[in-house]
């Protein structure tokens, strides 16, 4: 048990240890600065170095490992500051384990000068010693582990994956982002006794609208003010000497034609004053109240950009919070381009097509007026209601901000210092075609300059904004409005396109890799995708994926989650994986309920076999695979229970999943073996099964085999848990250490030192990945830790790997690690079951290992380890295997 705890602590430290080195200058031998290393960090088992350099090539070196790049990332800041081309940035990373930090010298950076350039000094990048940080992490590990003891006990007793997921989540070993909780009290109910909406006192608003160019958009903005303003209004237009000569005459005619119907004032600046001085002119005019037309009191002032397109009924919704709550100085609505009030993604601009803004506001109108009235560090001046009282107390905007941007932040901070509040309003969406007034290039310059002013005046402001973004108190509204945005994609006079909705787990791995690839394709073709995850801290985590970013929220309220998804008029429902859900037998009905349109399609994927059995790997309770799981199987692993404790047999389980599987247009599997497993349970659905093997995300080169006489080193690739063969690997390692495979391991040990492979640590067994801490390996086994596929060739050469072993004991649906190892050309051993067995049988360098189907009480692990040793010993007597090209994938088969 002690060794297991040590192994788990090592995994915890590797995941959470963060070290940062000091920035450093790159200099040539003439003493000239030719670059700068801005960031040196170790995080998540990777060393990352980034900066800029005027060099032909940059090389990062760590412990014999190297990464090279031509510095050509765009760095506009460097180019503008130094007057040089902006393509000088670099960003490099290398694997960096705890062992690497302990045994290797500090990382180094080498810069190759441009042709004809002066030699550049190499740079050492020392990192802090990891010891103090590891001590702090160890103490935190002990405390977290103590708090997780009930979940640990639950896992050992029941082997329920929900307990395992809870332990991983508690230790922060889950690589997926966790979402903030959603507020389910968002929508109006339609019941006046529940909604209790206070009537709005009558008032007349004053709209201050500065104008500079963008005539076509101005016409649209004015037309919307006329058509959609639902309160008495006064409009003050400030024409700021536009360079477009058509703007001023248009405004004169427009105002003249409405003198008898509306209260409109046109102020014409004799010269261009810029945004802030124009706004201040308008605010001064708003303060000079005209003679009242009737008894309607003067209400708030609304600062509105000429590129803001207001929707129907906007005004009453915008001013309501100010009239019904105390000390509210400003109110800002949601928008597609409004920093912290943006949707579908926070602080990200999203361009809208005609009609999308109105579709999003139609959803905003269904929110309760009091829902998510959110205190915020600032408002955003594209459309902002301002209290007349606070305008008097805090004064006008500060002209120090030049032509604009950041001035509303400054005003809001002054107001907060005096006790005023700023609210974000969920229940109104105003489209903002940002940048039209000044142009995008000029905006970037203005923002950079004015951000410096804000940072000097209010040092804590940036941290407040970052805290707001991290907590995202408006995420529920952001997500709901984002659903409306996604649902309106592709509409424009036609039926909206179906949005893919994936049900997925939170455990990472190959299924997650596939999902991310699929979503990337969705973003290219449609522009959006939705993921509904199970297995997190709450039952549901809903994610809206857009080109501008991912918006996430979590909830235990199934009805509310379904209401959010109902905002998508059309859906393409894809079951990816439901492992980890607390009530998995209810998932099929929930997914079927999402089919709201007759043409909504369903696809069921088999990344594992969860629809066939609660033992999603098809292993019996003793961890042995004994063939397809038909209805009569009564092993404990294939039984389940409802949340109320009512037991469920394997037949009950399969009956619960059958309606979803039958409703699916296609059942997608990734290997012929998986097709056979599904066919064994639902033979009538054979014609719907499509075999679609994955493609490797990148092509790996064939590795040069070690020199003759080299000591055999067995490489194991991947993160090895129970079903991946952890017990087999543990037993094999102990037998190798004890000399059980003397014929195999002794060859090459007596070869001259100069003929031995150059590797960090000679070993009979190397694990490139991690192992479940419950299966501690002997100290003779080198455990590398996390890796990425691009690291495989270098790591194989570094450790002198001569053979690969895939010890997985379940019939995998597809095995990336098997295909990655086969691509190296070295011999690959895997048990002759599942997709891994298919792959090694088809490859010239594959070695299928028979896996004996043992009975209860037999030593299945011992038999499996013995089979591997027998195969390895058999290989030692064979001629060298031919190197493999990329292993052929089974032909893709569509349902007939």
Image (tube, rainbow, N blue to C red):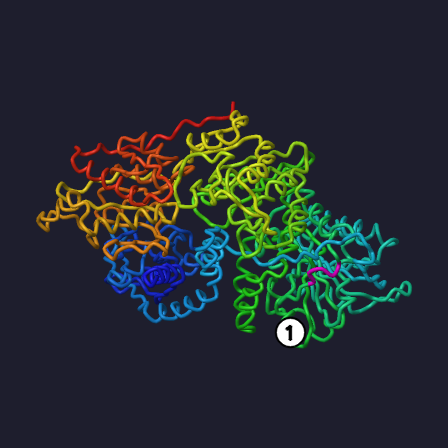
Q: In which quarter of the view is residue 601 placed?
A: top right
Residue lying farthest right? 294
On screen, 450 above or below 792? below
Residue shown at 31%/31% (left/top)?
841
In-image side of 439 versus 866 (left or right): right
On screen, 115 above or below 18? above
Residue shown at 61%/35% (left/top)?
659
Q: In which quarter of the image is the N terminus?
A: bottom left
103 or 628: nearer the eye?
628
The answer, for residue 349, to whether it is visible in the render is no
Horizontal and vertical percent for residue 336?
A: 63, 51
Q: Does the magenta stretch include residue 846?
A: no
- What's the magenta region? 369-373
The answer, for residue 825, to whether it is visible in the render is yes
In-image side of 146 versus 187 (left or right): left
Q: In which quarter of the view is residue 317 placed?
A: bottom right
Horizontal and vertical percent for residue 43?
A: 38, 60
Secondary structure under the numbered disc 1 in the rendered image: helix
In-image side of 21 versus 303 (left or right): left
Total marks shown come to 1
In-image side of 330 versus 614 (left or right): right
Q: Main secondary structure of the magenta part?
A: loop
Horizontal and vertical percent for residue 352?
A: 63, 45
């Amino acid at each position: 048990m002690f060794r297991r705890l040590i192994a788990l602590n090592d995994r915890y430290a590797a995941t959470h240890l963060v070290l940062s080195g000091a920035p450093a200058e790159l200099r040539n031998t003439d003493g000239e600065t030719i670059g700068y290393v801005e960031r040196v960090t170790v995080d998540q088992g990777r060393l990352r170095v980034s900066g800029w350099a005027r060099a032909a090539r940059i090389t990062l070196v760590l412990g014999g490992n190297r990464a090279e790049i031509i510095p050509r990332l765009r760095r506009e800041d460097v180019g503008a500051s130094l007057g040089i081309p902006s393509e000088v940035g670099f960003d490099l990373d290398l694997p960096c384990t705890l062992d690497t930090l302990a045994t290797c010298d500090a990382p180094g950076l080498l810069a190759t000068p441009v042709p004809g350039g002066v030699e550049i000094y190499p740079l050492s990048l020392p990192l802090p010693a990891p010891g103090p940080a590891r001590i702090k992490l160890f103490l935190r590990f002990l405390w977290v582990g103590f708090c997780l003891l009930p979940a640990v006990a639950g896992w050992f007793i029941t082997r329920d994956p929900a307990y395992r997921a809870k332990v991983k989540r508690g230790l922060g070993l889950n690589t997926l982002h966790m979402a903030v909780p959603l507020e389910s009290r968002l929508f109006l109910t339609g019941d006046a006794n529940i909604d209790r909406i206070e009537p709005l006192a009558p008032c007349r608003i004053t709209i201050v609208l500065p104008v500079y160019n963008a005539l076509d958009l101005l016409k649209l903005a004015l037309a919307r003010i006329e058509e959609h303003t639902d309160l008495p209004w006064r409009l003050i237009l400030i024409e700021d000497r536009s360079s477009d000569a058509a703007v001023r005459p248009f405004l004169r005619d427009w105002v003249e034609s409405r003198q008898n119907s509306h209260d409109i004032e046109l102020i014409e600046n004799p010269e261009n004053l810029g945004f802030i001085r124009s706004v201040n002119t308008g605010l001064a005019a708003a303060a000079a109240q005209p003679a009242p037309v009737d008894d309607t009191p003067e209400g708030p002032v609304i600062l509105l950009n000429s590129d803001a397109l207001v929707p129907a009924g906007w005004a009453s919704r915008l001013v309501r919070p100010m009239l019904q709550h105390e000390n509210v100085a400003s109110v800002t609505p949601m928008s597609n381009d409004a920093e912290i009030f943006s949707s579908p993604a926070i602080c990200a601009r999203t361009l809208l097509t005609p009609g999308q803004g109105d579709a999003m506001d139609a959803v905003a109108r269904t929110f309760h007026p009091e829902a998510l009235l959110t205190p915020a560090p600032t408002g955003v001046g594209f459309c902002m209601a301002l209290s007349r009282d606070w305008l008097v107390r805090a004064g006008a905007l500060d002209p120090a901000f030049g032509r604009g941007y950041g001035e509303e932040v400054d005003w809001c901070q002054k107001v907060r210092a005096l006790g005023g509040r700023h609210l974000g309003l969920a229940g109104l969406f105003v489209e903002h075609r940002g940048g039209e007034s000044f142009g995008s290039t000029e905006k970037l310059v203005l923002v950079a300059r004015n951000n410096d002013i804000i940072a000097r005046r209010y040092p804590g402001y940036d941290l407040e904004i970052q805290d707001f973004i991290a907590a995202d108190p408006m995420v529920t509204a952001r997500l709901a409005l984002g659903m409306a945005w996604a649902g309106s994609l592709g509409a424009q006079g036609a039926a909206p396109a179906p949005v893919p909705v994936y049900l997925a787990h939170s455990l990472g791995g190959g299924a997650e890799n596939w999902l991310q690839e699929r979503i990337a394709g969705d973003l290219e073709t449609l522009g959006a995708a939705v993921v509904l995850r199970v297995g997190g801290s709450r039952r549901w985590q809903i994610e809206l994926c857009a080109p501008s970013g991912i918006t996430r929220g979590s909830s235990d309220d199934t009805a509310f989650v379904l209401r959010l998804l109902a905002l998508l008029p059309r859906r393409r429902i894809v079951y990816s994986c439901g492992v980890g859900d607390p009530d998995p037998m209810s998932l099929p009905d929930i997914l079927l309920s999402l089919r709201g349109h007759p043409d909504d399609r369903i696809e069921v994927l088999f990344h594992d076999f969860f629809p066939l059995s609660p033992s999603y790997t098809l292993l019996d309770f003793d961890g042995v695979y004994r063939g397809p799981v038909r209805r009569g199987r009564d092993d404990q692993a294939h039984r389940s229970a409802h949340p109320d404790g009512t037991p469920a047999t394997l037949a009950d389980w399969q009956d619960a999943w059958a309606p979803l599987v039958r409703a699916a247009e296609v059942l997608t599997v990734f290997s012929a073996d998986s097709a056979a497993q599904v066919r064994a349970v639902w033979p009538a659905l054979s014609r719907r099964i499509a075999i679609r093997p994955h493609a490797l995300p990148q092509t790996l080169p064939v590795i040069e085999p070690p020199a003759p006489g080299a000591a055999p080193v067995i490489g194991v690739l991947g993160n090895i848990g129970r079903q991946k063969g952890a017990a087999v690997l543990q037993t094999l390692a102990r037998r190798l250490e004890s000399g059980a495979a003397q014929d195999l391991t002794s060859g090459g040990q007596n070869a001259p030192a100069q003929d031995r492979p150059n590797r960090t640590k000679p070993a009979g067994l190397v694990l490139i990945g991690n192992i479940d801490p419950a299966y501690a390996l002997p100290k003779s086994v080198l455990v590398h830790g996390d890796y990425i596929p691009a690291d495989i060739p270098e790591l194989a050469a570094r450790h002198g790997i001569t053979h690969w072993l895939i010890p997985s004991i379940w019939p995998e649906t597809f095995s990336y690690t098997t295909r990655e190892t086969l691509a190296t050309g070295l011999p690959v051993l895997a048990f002759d079951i599942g997709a891994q067995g298919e792959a090694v049988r088809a490859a010239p360098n594959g070695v299928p290992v028979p896996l004996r189907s043992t009975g209860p009480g037999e030593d299945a692990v011992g038999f499996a380890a013995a089979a591997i040793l027998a195969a390895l010993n058999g290989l030692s007597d064979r001629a060298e295997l031919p190197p493999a090209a990329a292993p052929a994938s089974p032909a893709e088969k569509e349902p007939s």
